[in-house]
Amino acid sequence: MSQEASRLFERSFSSLEEFADFISEKLQAPVTIEDSNHRLLAYSTHEEHTDSARVSTIIGRRVPEQVINKLWREGIIPSLHKQNTSVKIPEIAEIGLGSRMAVAIKKKQEILGYIWVLEGERALREDDAAVLEVASEKAATQLQQVQTRNKEEERGRQEYFWRLLTGDVQKEEDIERQMREWFPVSPRTAAVIVLEAEEPISESMYKKITYLVTTSQKVKCYFQTRVQQLIVMLAEPVYPPDREGIRWFLEDFIVLLKERFQIEQMEAGTGRLYSSLASIKNSYEEAMEVIHVNKKLPAERKPFVFYHELGFYRYAEALIEQKNKQNMLHPELEALKQYDFRHNTELFQSLAVFLRHDGNMKKASESLHIHVNTMAYRIKRVEEIIKKDLKDAYEKLSLLLEISLDEMNK
Amino acid sequence: MSQEASRLFERSFSSLEEFADFISEKLQAPVTIEDSNHRLLAYSTHEEHTDSARVSTIIGRRVPEQVINKLWREGIIPSLHKQNTSVKIPEIAEIGLGSRMAVAIKKKQEILGYIWVLEGERALREDDAAVLEVASEKAATQLQQVQTRNKEEERGRQEYFWRLLTGDVQKEEDIERQMREWFPVSPRTAAVIVLEAEEPISESMYKKITYLVTTSQKVKCYFQTRVQQLIVMLAEPVYPPDREGIRWFLEDFIVLLKERFQIEQMEAGTGRLYSSLASIKNSYEEAMEVIHVNKKLPAERKPFVFYHELGFYRYAEALIEQKNKQNMLHPELEALKQYDFRHNTELFQSLAVFLRHDGNMKKASESLHIHVNTMAYRIKRVEEIIKKDLKDAYEKLSLLLEISLDEMNK
DNA sequence: GCACCATTTGTGAAATTTCACAAATCGGTG
DNA sequence: CACCGATTTGTGAAATTTCACAAATGGTGC
């Protein structure tokens, strides 16, 4: 049977479309071919019933995000990755997916793409599976050609991206022209997102990340590159088409990295959204700054996503530098620590918590699991020791700043 | 009579003490000779009744501060400066000053010192005044010699002071050795005080300032120098012997400058108190930083005296630099200003006042003379526009910082 | 053990803040 | 001029904070 099937494909196809139509003809069912990131490569035009998942895929030229998510959660994509045979997929009405059969297109275990066959009136049988598997092998050689072409182009894009990131290209119109060559439309607004892993990013990890980025429909990623443990991308928020799009994307992203690939510990930072492409350099530097701040932040504070969220932390670097230059310990705070040490008390921490809770005794005391009056007493004590009025906004600002810098400076 | 008197002094005196004794002998009254800064130069040892002001002057080797103050307020010193004749001074029991006669020692209207004659049992007469005036002329030549010697020494000190200020001398023991040559004791702790006038400091102004510094007994001034519009001094707080001594001194100083010499507009800044003389450079830089900050502070904020009071303003320079480098206007605050502009409202100012009053609605509203609820309404509005939670300590810190920097950056 | 001091906790009244609601005001618009 | 929405002010009850006082706890030195 397999032999019979393999003979079927002993011809050449002028295009992937023709190839899709050919399979469709043989199996009497609609066929869709995707690349490794679930972007549509070709689909059969066989007049046949089609489910809504397939329609959306064709319309959007990519598999809808929630379909991909579902296929992962159901274990379908993992099993396509694991085995070289085709997989039968029962109907999943929830996402408009009719029952179908699928196979991964692989080259030495590397995923190049997928072929999907929708089960129409005719039930797909055991021998249809064999046909599909042979088709997958045939497709591999075809896709590889496409891939090498893409790789060439990708290299050019990456280089250009670095030039943008470093500010080597400045003229807005030059950039616009170049962008039009590669993309149907330029991003309206875009921000640089930087991801930082704990160790240099391997080829396989990079693929996985690319997969997640490409399949996300919260953002559209124009450029993407990596260097050492960094991944840098230029993303336009799509859904919703503002900052939140990026936030949602990153939230998903971190979860999915862990869920699907068991990758934890990845810092992320995003620069501001710019509408001018000449500002990519700024956005990049801002994203890096976010990561820099996050890395210094104490564990209990949840990391920042956006540069504009940094607040005073935007100045952290300059402040810490200045502080170290003067190398002066804050005399009052030092006195407080001294006191704590000698009297076995926790006034410093109490002050810090008090300030972090905006001087709200109740919340501060709750956070430390102590009585409100205890908190009040301690704060009064602190005021005596450091000889400062803790109701004065500037004193509070100065102290909280000092304490926050201290936290970072370790 | 004047001729007769002048013949009296046609001899030479081996020392100022001998000179004082001589006058005392002639007038049958105790005599005290002071330099232009009311430091004791010589006093007669004639056995005679003496008032408490004279006793303290001799014991302290300088006229007590409150005596000087009183003599100024009573118009006695000004009249000594104005006229070349001697002045009769009635008793001022309040400060233990018996009635006396005095004359200024001058050289071309420049004050070199003073001669005081205490009125004992014998009432001082018209012809005694003439004797005193001739004595003053004779003293002038004597004092001038002392002064030129002092000037030599002073030049050496000033040069050394600059070396200390610039950190040119570093070794603590070298400094100690040099200090012992000039002063009976080194300061226990000392701080650099810098004064900055609006225009370069003239010789006469410098003299006046030196006068105030020297006669103040709140601090002991070890070094003093000037350059352009700056006066720099190294002062040890004496009464009280901590920071407050310097604060009191400066408070007095500013008042007296205005009261006695009609000099207004003088910025002052003080570095930290150090016990090591090698840290003078630090203290100097800190003092300059205080002045720098004060100059940028909005008028309604009262200027800082000490470096350690600066709080976050210590970082102002680094912050402003960083801010200008990024040259990014705070997007939320800009949006708020925009809103104000378009709707003819005062939300930005309301926010600023609110933050400066540490989020206290009542005080903030009072300060703006509006109803509390209006304030609350505005703040709610602000929260909507800038999309930030104004109960979050870090948001408040960031905003107040940003606003304060804005104020300074104009 | 006891006295002493700093610290913590408990209690309740007084002061202050917050909040919802309504009425008044104001600027611009059709 | 009436109307609309945004803003301001007024009112009072509910919630929260502050404060004074007292009692309990705990460690230290004699």
Image (cartoon, coloured by chain):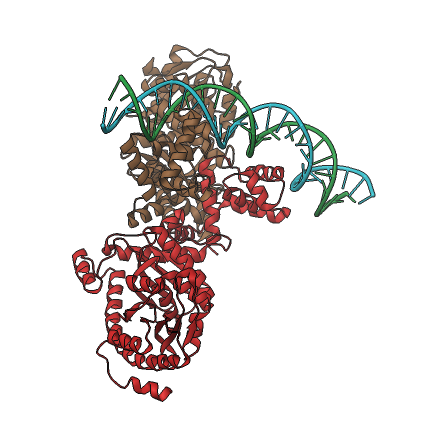
Chain colours: A brown, B red, C green, D cyan
Q: Which residue lies at the image location 40% right of the left edge and 34% below the top edge?
A: A379
- The part of the image, by quadrant, that contains residue B159 is bottom left
User: Against B324, is A42 above or below?
Assistant: above
Residue A314 horizontal/vertical position (percent): 40, 43
Viewer can see residue A167: no
Q: Nearer the viewer, residue B356 or A195?
A: B356
Residue B14 horizontal/vertical position (percent): 21, 78
Viewer can see residue A222: yes
Residue A10 horizontal/vertical position (percent): 35, 23
Q: Which residue lies at the image location 38% right of the left edge and 12% below the top edge?
A: A127
Q: How many marks?
A: 0
Q: Give the quadrant of the N terminus of chain B.
A: bottom left
Q: Nearer the viewer, residue A91 or A344?
A: A344
- The part of the image, by quadrant, that contains residue C2 is top left
User: Against B202, is A182 above or below?
Assistant: above
Q: Nearer the viewer, residue B171 or A49?
A: B171
Q: Nearer the viewer, residue B284 or A178?
A: B284
User: Against A39, is B259 above or below?
Assistant: below
Q: Which residue lies at the image location 62% right of the left edge and 37% below the top edge?
A: B373
